[in-house]
Image (cartoon, grey):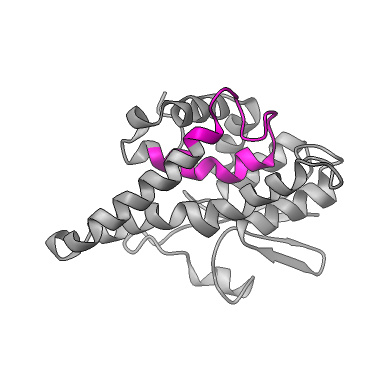
Amino acid sequence: MLVVHHLNDSRSQRILWLLEELGAPYEIKTYQRDATTRLAPPELKAIHPLGKSPVVTEGDATVIESGAIIDYIVRHHGGGKLAPAQNSKDYDAYQQWLHYAEGSAMLPLMLFMYVGRLGEAGAPLHPRIESEIANHLGYVEGALAGRDWLMGEFSAADIQMSFVGEVTGAFGRYGAYPNIAAWVKRFQARPAYRKALEKGGPYNMGPKD
């Protein structure tokens, strides 16, 4: 049985959503953040030395990193759903989205959050961070122009990239990126997304309605 080691209010919410979209059987082992530090509990290090979430286990396999987990689940439990065929022209673009979400897109958004905590000490970094945020969000905005989903049809690429879209809203930037805003509204309305929220517990990036 596939086990999702799920940290409350974290990016592992995406993995629950993916499994609900696929209708694949799984179990959830839930971990709670430290109320003061917001860090994951040490118990997660018993699953993987990094002590991070998401992480999934199945038999003797342990998989970390959201993109790798999504790829693993789609290949082993997807039954051909939510990803282009590997021999299709769209497969490479799909793989790029899986890697891009955490490899490039989230970095300036995370820097914005952390550097903002430095107050005036972080001021010299703000122009470069803002430039990179505009660069990446502009890229995603353009990719969604004239289409509902990143690959044209809904796929696991939308699930992997969803946190980027939700953080965009959390930082109050939907006004500048209407395609991203509409995309987030569409995927947050999906029944599987809502079901995953019921199972995963409170999630600050979720819909506010």
To which quarter of the image does residue 84 belong?
top right
All told, the count of numbered labels is 0
Q: Is residue 194 left or right of residue 176?
A: right
Residue found at the very far bottom of the displayed protein: 49
Residue 20 is left or right of residue 43, and the answer is right
- Is residue 142 shown in magenta? yes
Q: Can residue 99 be seen in this snapshot?
A: yes
- The reply to whether residue 204 is in sight is no
Q: Position of residue 70 (x, y in %)?
A: 69, 51
Residue sitting at 67 percent across and 29 percent down? 152
Residue 139 image point, x, y percent:
48, 41
Q: Is residue 50 above or below residue 35?
A: below
Q: Residue 24: percent from the left, percent from the top?
A: 79, 41
Tell me the residue at 12%/61% (across/down): 120
At 47% from the left edge and 64% from the top edge, which residue is drawn? 40
In the rendering, at what x and y percent does residue 92 appear?
73, 49
Residue 158 is one of the magenta-drawn residues: yes
Q: Residue at x 50, y 34 (%)?
A: 142
For residue 49, above or below residue 75? below
Q: In this rendered view, identify the residue nearer to me: 126 or 171.
A: 126
Q: Quadrant of the C terminus?
A: top left
| Front residue of 193 and 159 | 159
Residue 116 falls in which quadrant of the image? Answer: bottom left
In this view, the residue in front, 40 or 161, is 161
Side (left or right) of 30 relative to 125:
right
Q: Which residues are magenta?
A: 141-168
